[in-house]
Image (tube, rainbow, N blue to C red):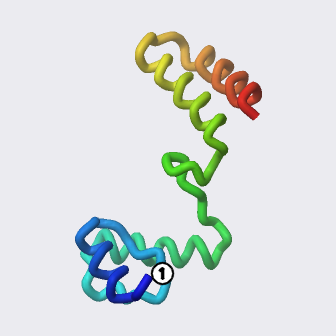
């Protein structure tokens, strides 16, 4: 978690550091904006967890949601029906 390592790793990876005390000086415009947005979200208690990485919802709920959305995109159907299925799937997965 060394600051220098965090900077070098994230510059190569194309992401931003987990540490808040890493300078944005060597990051591109996207990295600078991401770092600034993260600081604002933390300050305003508005940071949302990642759905993709399992921080926003439990894995069972995430899986149920993905199943419904996948079925909707692959099979079609009405958005209203998909919404009802999504609500039911989330409720069942909790």
Seen at 65% across and 74% down, the residue is 44
Q: Which residue is mark 1?
A: 19
Q: Residue 2, relative to residue 85: is it above or below?
A: below
Q: In the rendered view, does 85 fall on the left or right side of 1?
A: right
Nearest the viewer among 59 and 23 is 59
Q: Position of residue 61 (x, y in %)?
A: 65, 35
Q: Position of residue 81 (x, y in %)?
A: 62, 14
- Dividing the picture into quadrants, the one containing residue 41 is bottom right
Q: In the rendered view, does 39 fall on the left or right side of 93?
A: left
Seen at 55% across and 19% down, the residue is 79
| SS category of the residue bearing label 1 | loop
Q: In the rendered view, does 4 fall on the left or right side of 67?
A: left
Nearest the viewer among 33 and 4 is 4
Seen at 57% across and 32% down, the residue is 63
Task: For label 1, count other residues whose C-alpha is less than 10 Å away and answer few (under 14), some (14-19) or many (20+).
Answer: few
Q: Position of residue 14 (x, y in %)?
A: 28, 66
Q: Quadrant of the C terminus?
A: top right
- Dividing the picture into quadrants, the one containing residue 86 is top right
Q: Residue 73, relative to residue 18: is it above or below?
A: above
Seen at 56% across and 22% down, the residue is 68
């Amino acid at each position: 978690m060394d600051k220098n390592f965090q900077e070098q790793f994230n510059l190569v990876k194309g992401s931003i550091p987990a540490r808040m005390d890493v300078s944005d000086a060597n990051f591109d415009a996207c990295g600078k904006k991401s770092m600034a947005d993260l600081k604002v979200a933390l300050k305003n208690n508005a940071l949302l967890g990642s759905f993709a990485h399992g921080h926003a919802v439990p894995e069972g709920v995430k899986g149920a949601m993905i199943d419904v959305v996948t079925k909707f995109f692959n099979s079609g159907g009405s958005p209203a029906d998909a919404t009802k299925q999504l609500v039911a799937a989330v409720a069942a997965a909790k």
